[in-house]
Each structure stands twice: as C-alpha cells, then as structure tokens.
Image (cartoon, rainbow, N blue to C red):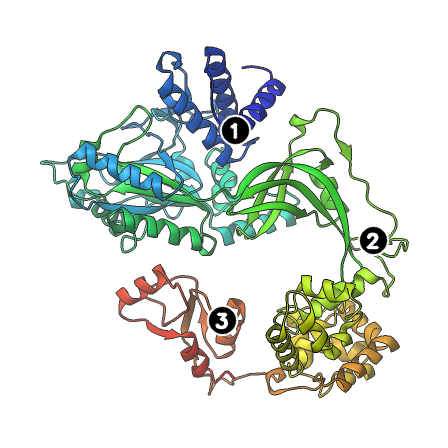
Amino acid sequence: MKDKKLLLEQTKTLLSRLAETQEGSFSKNDMDELVDVLHFHENQYYIQDSPLIADYEYDRLYKYLEQKELENPSLKRIDSPTQRVSVDLISEFNSVPHLSPMLSLANSYDADDLKDFDAQVKKWTGTENQTLQYAVEPKYDGGTICLVYDEDILVRAATRGNGTLGEEMTHNAKRMNTIPLRALFSKYGIKKVELRGEALIPLDKFKEVNAQREKEGLEILANPRNAATGALRVKDSREVSKRKLEAFVYQISYIEWIDEPKPWTFHSQGIKILDSLGFKTPDTNEIICQGIEEVIAKCDYWQSIRDEYAYEIDGMVVKVDNLALQEESGYTAHHPRWAIAYKFKAKQATSKLLQVEFQVGKIGSITPVAKIEPTPLAGVTVSSITLHNEDFIRSKDLRIGDTILIERAGDVIPYIVKSFPEYRTGDETLIQFPTHCPSCNSVLKKNESEAAWKCENTLCPAQILQRIIHHASKDAMDIEGLGKSIIERFNELGWIQNIADIYRLDYEKIAALEGFGTKSAENLKNAIEKAKNNPLQRLLYSLSIPLLGQKASKTLAQYVESIFDFCEWQTENYTAIKDIGPVLAGEMERFFSNESQVNLLNELAELGVNTRQLEEDKPHQFDQENAPLLGKTILFTGSLSIDRKKAEKLAETAGAKNISAVSKNLNILVVGENAGSKLTKAQSLGTVVIWTEDEFLEAINYK
C-alpha cells in the first residue's frame, strides 16, 4: 500500500475534483490512484475501525469509480472494490465459508434514484406495465452477521468477512438474547438454513454502557456501530453481554429442505416466519409498499423520524418482495439487482477549522465557537460549531487549519467528532484561549470544580445582552416575535438595555422601523402583554440564575406565594426541598441578596409582570385513590404541542407507567401529528385505547 500521507493528499484532491465539472481524459494512473485510495479507506473503516473520511464521502468516491469503470472498461482493475464486497477479516478468528455469497447493496440517495431502480427491475422482469410490491426495511448501522441453523439448532455464526468467507463468532452470538439457540425451522420443512442480520446496540443501552465504563475508568466507546462490530470480535464473550448487543434478522439466504421444497412466494412471508420463530425482525405490518411512489414516501417518512427510533439507522433497504421476480432480476458481481439501499442525508462530513471566536454567555461563561468551511450536512449548511470549553479543545487536539470530522447530533446540533492529525501540513496553529473578557476586558477566572472560564463582571455588556435574549426565549417567558436578532437590533438602537426595557418599548417607534410596520408592532405588543401573565416558574427560570434550570424553577415556585419571599430564604430553606442542593441554594441566596437584582424584580412588578404564584405553579398531585391513570401503561408517539418529557411526567403523576414500545402490555397510546408505525401497530392489536393529546390532558384534568 502507498504511503499513508500520500493517500490522504490524494483523497483531498479527489474529493475536490468531485465538486467540479468532470471533463477531460481519464488515464490508467487516474484509475490506479482512485482504486488505491478506496482500498486505503476500506482498510481504515473495516480493519482499523478508524475511518478518515465520512461514509457519504466514501460513497461518492465509490460511485465515481463505478462511473469511470463504465466509461473506461479497459482500465478496470481485477482488484477494484467494485469486483468484490467489503472485507473485515482479521487473523484472530477462524474463517468459515458462507452457504451463499453475502453481496453488498447498490446505493441510492433521492427519489430519482429509486425511480431508476424501479424502471430497471421492471425491464429485467418484463413487468413494465405493473405496479410492483416492495419491502422497505430499516438499514441498521451495526455489524452484519450470518447465522446457520441445522436441525433447528444454532450451529454457527459469522461476520460478513469478504462475502465468501467470514469470521466464525458463534460463542459471541450465543451471548445475544435476541438470537434463539433453537428455532423450529423443521415446522416449515426446513433442515438447514442460513440467515442474514445485524448486530447492534440500542441507543439508550449504549448510553448506559458508556456510563458504566466511565465509572470503571474504561475508555468511552465512540459510537454504537463501532461498539457493536468490536464486540463481535472479542475473545471474551462476556463483553457481548456487557455491551448489550441485540440482533435483527432480515433475510433467509439459503435453505436445505427435509423432503420436498415448500417455498413461499414473498420475502415478507419469510420475515413473518422468522418472527414466529422468535427472531427480532423488521415489522412486517410496516414494510410493504405498493409501487415506487409509496416506497419514496416511506423512505422520506423514516428519514424524518430516524432520531426517534431506538436503533441507529443510516437509511432504508428496498427489496422486490416477490421471490420469483428477485430470481429474474438476478445479480451483478457486487450486488443483487432486486434490492437497493436508500441512504439518508449524511450525518457526518469532513471540513476545515478556519478560526475560533470566543462568546460570552448569560452568566459570564466563555464559550469558544469554531468557524469552519461551510459544509452541507443533513440538509443544512454548517459554518459554526460550539467547542464547549478549553478542555474540549485540548481533548480533541484541535488546531486552526485542521481537517475535522463533523456530525449533526439528532440532525440538529453540529458537533466536532475529531481532528485528523494525518492531514496536517505544519501550517496549523494552536488555539489560544483568552485571558481577558472579549466584551469588557475583565480578567477571566476559572473555578477548580468547573470546566469553563468566566467573566465575573455582572455588568458586562455581553452578559446583559445574553440574559435579555434568554429572558424572552421560548423556554423562559416565551415572547413570540422577540428573538435573538430582534433583541440585538433593539439593543444597538438603545431601546433594550436591560430586561425591564422589554416591558416599556415604544411600539410607535417599532412600527416605523424598517421591516416592521403597524401589524408587526401590534403583534409584538400582544406577545409581551401575554408574557406578563406567565406563571412564577417561568419568571424564575428567565432570570439566568446560575444552575437554576426549568425543573428546579418549577419545584421552587411551589413553595412561595411571591418571588420576593426568596429574599428571606436561607440555605436550609432550599435544601429542605427534595432535589435542591447546597450549591444551587448558594446561588439563589446570592441572587436574592443582590440589591440590583431585587430592584430589577421591583421594576418588573411595577411594569405589570406577574411575580406571584399562579395555579399552574401549584403542585399537581393525585393520591393513590383518585389517580385517573392508576395502574395503566402509556406511550406517546408523534409530535405533541407539549414537551414529550413533560407529557410523560404528567402521566406518571397521574398514576401511569411509561413504556417504550407498542405491545400487548400497552393500555393507552397518545398520538400527536405524524404518529406513524406505533399507531398502526396499536390499531392492529385492537386492545390499545388510542387518545389524542387533548383527550389525555382532559383525562388527567390538566389545565
């Protein structure tokens, strides 16, 4: 293999070339470079478990190779990645042959790709005038496994390997409770069978595993996929149990019959058989689609809810459901023609760290923010990413000029996964953390027990501005129309210099301001007047008291008639309340003994802002006799108007037990918009009571 540094340079060149119009000749040297780069990154991904480019970028290079091989067939190399499937063999395990080849899947990225796939299948099978039935299953992002059962007993389990040979890991498979040691295939006339599946870790269990490893002083696992594939290869099978691996089975790939063959007609029928035998399988009530338009809609839907799913998935697998049509479609050397992977928008990509800005938060914490080359990621262009604190920068070994791997956690929050020291040229520079506040030039200080540097000047202009923004935010006073950019604009005009100024705005001036008008000014006035009547818990949270979150604000609001009661409280008053500790008690005491803060509260009261306990602040409790949902199990699905965690807490307070999946044990399903598969499954059971959000709130007498 070529020098690693050279291959990384060639990678950068190739990815840059893909962003440009492809013209000109393509030589043997070009082909050699492209194949060598792909081999290098295959090794980094499958053997080293240390990928140096994002999956999406590898896929782009692979498709580019396919294109160039099609255009230049004489240049195709025997060892091209298109001529074989992925390799993950390591020498520590015995190699065993698969009973049928394990091929890769062709990839698709949009509706047009899926339509082309549909047209090709119809052409191969002579069904141009028919609507084909497809099975559409989640594309699990874990470690592929192959299971062999002989006379109903699990006799072998192996990894994917090179598609012909895999690494035998039966001892590890037996540690997974989702893999039956005995399954009654003989009931269906089957003597010997080979199954395909995926070993993976549920996302909630992955967090638990890492929390336990942290307690034990072990290295934190990077992500669920690597944790799963790594566990398949460990010699001590107890590690499989520790990592809480599960297995989904999604394909019957080989059968030997006891007597006469008794084949079924559809792939989905085979999945139902596996389900009946105790395997964890894709939901057969959800996977069937009639025609490619339903397939496209199904893929779009799953992409929108992927982060609500209990497992990591990176796309969907679309299969022709009719087994006879699968046979007619046939195979290439690389993939079956009757199946295709629909890849979700990339969650990861590489970019370049250009510079770091330091921002001042509402309580003085200094937050470094990375400015990166604008990079498309999961449907948006990312150009800024928080670096949290100095320790984060050091732990990631970040430098200005670095090539970095970024992702969007939950497709929302951009995050730097790691830097790539391999790409460094020597021109990169260390990130220098400031010693003085970027806003007021005060000396920064750092508490030994905290990670953040802080500006302790409470009159720092940047802090004041951030506290105003927080006060008006959705989770605090929820003033619609008074977002960050509007507050910054009003601040520059001198109209809002502190929180109280929000409640004495001149709406005639606002109406005359460019971009507003009378209607916009009136809407803003109504929103601010509405905010004046907020419950006490919202006002408390809006004051930016250090360590005081929403939950603690709600708790404390239950114990006072007026916010000014806290002026008389001492540490023991706070710590007598469950979940209120001495550190938060100290912050509350400091705030309410500060004359300027109390003066601000007096100003707010004079301006009409509610400072007293309202009905919503009072504890909403049921005793065991009148709890309306006592003994019931409940599950929420779809988009709700109230926060999901809040809904679950309300249900718990009303006596219900929250569970995580639809099953025969579920009593009540509360559905919001776009409820999806859970609603369908609950309806099919016929025993689940289905409520709207309003019906749920009415049942618990929530106002």
> In the image, which disc is placed on residue 20?
1
Q: Which disc number belongs to residue 641?
A: 3
Earlier in the chain: of badge 2 and badge 1, it is 1
Q: Secondary structure at mark 1?
A: loop
Instruction: Name the residue beneath numbered marker 2.
Output: 448
**Residue 67 seen:** yes
Q: Which numbered disc, 2 or 3, marks the residue that appears first in the sequence?
A: 2
The percent coordinates of residue 304 (x first, y second) are 43, 54
Determine the secondary structure under disc 2.
Answer: loop
Q: Which mark is residue 217?
A: none
Residue at the left extreme of this rendering:
260
Q: Quadrant of residue 249?
A: top left
Which of pointers 2 and 3 indicates the residue nearer the eye? Answer: 3
What amino acid type is highlighted by mark number 2?
Glu
Relative to 432, is 167 on the left or the right?
left
The quadrant of the image that shows the N terminus is: top right
Secondary structure under tag 3 reads loop
Q: Is residue 212 visible?
A: no
Residue type at mark 3 is: Ser
Asked if the residues shown at circle 2 and circle 3 are in contact, with their CB atoms under 8 angstroms apart, the answer is no
- Dot 1: few (<14), some (14–19), or many (≥20) neighbours within 10 Å? few
Comparing 25 with 247, the one in front is 25
